[in-house]
Image (cartoon, rainbow, N blue to C red):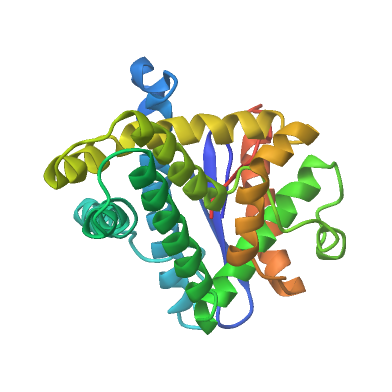
Amino acid sequence: MMRTPRFWSVAVRRPDGRISNVAHPTSTPAARWPLLRLPIIRGVAALGDSMAIGFRALSVSAQWAATDDDAVDDEPGGELSTGALIGSFVVAIGFAVLAFKVGPGLITSWLGLHPGVPFVLVEGGIKITLLVGYLAGLGLVPDLKRVFQYHAAEHMAINALEDGADLTPDVVARYSRIHVRCGTAFLLWVMLVSIVVFLVITPSHWYWLVVSRVVLLPVIAGIAYEVIRLAGRFGTNPAVRVVLAPGLWLQRLTTRVPTADQLEVSIDALREVLRLEEERGGTPQVEVMA
């Protein structure tokens, strides 16, 4: 899947070997509400928008995978309904908050530590350990390994584009599967920013601890977004890359070396959004969506 400022596209390898592509305009609330374009707030809005598009893309991919090989139409069936999108949001956010925000805090509290610097550092260590273990475990599932290969294919295609190289599988295959604007790095930065925030905010009771981890999540996510945004602008700076090194390393858990066929799919999605942007006279600035 690829996304530019005004369009997003998802390319899918169908059971018969053909590649089908579905593209839509990007309609974000921030385009209508200037308040949502302010620092920190724009990160929360962008996260929600990215999740919505991601769920829609997964829906398109699943429908194409189940399409009859003899079908010749260029559009899959209907996408997720509003109710299904909301339900997916609730489940995804609920799992993330319980597993990586509330859970580590409660575990640390049960260890007998009192609010303070040691508490926050131990809690942060548990968060990062759970995240790394979760991602490493996902990589052992065969079907998800293919997802991680496509994830790498997206990064490699974008790296080639930003280097001005030809978008062909042979050329793209020579590029790194790591990218500074990856969502995996965003997850790690959410963890790191939360450690800093909670060094300042240290509730004295477990129930306030739970509330603080939930209520402050949008603020923490917004700050982490600003870090990733800054990295995207200065990602070639050696000092910046040192700071980003942990997030770049984490991507090795969520990417695998793709095949030439998978690179072809990522290139197809990238070409489509670039074509649409060129038709509208836009700038071919591409974001990682994986």
Nearer-the-camera pick, 102 or 161: 102
Q: Is residue 106 visible?
A: yes
Quadrant, the N terminus: bottom right
Left or right of 158? Residue 127 is left
Q: Position of residue 32 (x, y in %)?
A: 35, 21
Numbered disc total: 0
**Where is 40 relative to 214, above or below?**
above
**Where is 240 relative to 127, above or below?**
above
Nearer-the-camera pick, 139 or 265: 139
Q: Give the quarter of the image for residue 220.
A: top left
Q: Position of residue 240 (x, y in %)?
A: 71, 33
**Where is 157 relative to 277, above or below?**
below
The residue drawn where x is 66% and y is 65% is 265
The residue drawn where x is 64% and y is 79% is 17
The residue drawn where x is 29% and y is 55% is 108
Left or right of 148? Residue 174 is right
The residue drawn where x is 41% and y is 24% is 31
Q: Position of residue 99 (x, y in %)?
A: 30, 60
Q: Give the quarter of the image for residue 38.
A: top left
Nearer-the-camera pick, 174 or 211: 211
Q: Position of residue 285 (x, y in %)?
A: 66, 34
**Where is 242 relative to 110, above or below?**
above
Q: Is residue 70 visible?
A: no
